[in-house]
Image (cartoon, rainbow, N blue to C red):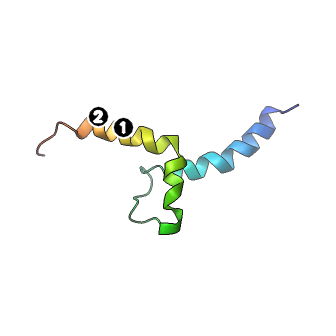
Amino acid sequence: MPSPEAAAAIVVPIVIPLMVFAGFFLSAKTVPDWLLWLKYLSWLYYSNEMALINQWEDVTSL
């Protein structure tokens, strides 16, 4: 039977890269091309994009 410790050991190596490549820690311009596909697997990438669009879509000037 799976334990919380086993789940934590599996989740950390999966979630940390998704967080890093989501767009608020690293810019897509600084990520090597062969790693850019990771952002499309991250649900954090899509939530970050939605938040940015929600906040900035009606702003015409700063």
Task: Tell me the residue at 49%/41% (across/down).
Answer: 44
**Which secondary structure lies at badge 1?**
helix
Amino acid type, residue under disc 1 in the picture? Met
Check whether the beta carbons of the residues at disc 1 and disc 2 lie within 8 A of each other: yes
- Dot 2, how many residues are within 10 Å of its Cα: few (below 14), some (14-19), or many (20+)? few
- Which numbered tag is attached to residue 17? none
In the rendered image, the quadrant that contains the N terminus is: top right
x and y percentages locating residue 58 in the rendered image: 17, 36
Amino acid type, residue under disc 2 in the picture? Asn
Q: Is residue 61 above or below residue 27?
A: above
> Is residue 4 in sight in this rendering?
yes
- Which numbered tag is attached to residue 50? 1
> Is residue 32 in sight in this rendering?
no
**Which secondary structure lies at badge 2?**
helix
Separation (CA) of disc 1 from disc 2: 6 Å
Task: Tell me the residue at 78%/33% (across/down).
Answer: 4
Residue 15 is left or right of residue 30, and the answer is right
- Total number of numbered discs in the rendering: 2
Q: Nearer the viewer, residue 51 or 25?
A: 51
x and y percentages locating residue 48 in the rendered image: 40, 41
Check disc 2 and report the residue beneath it: 54
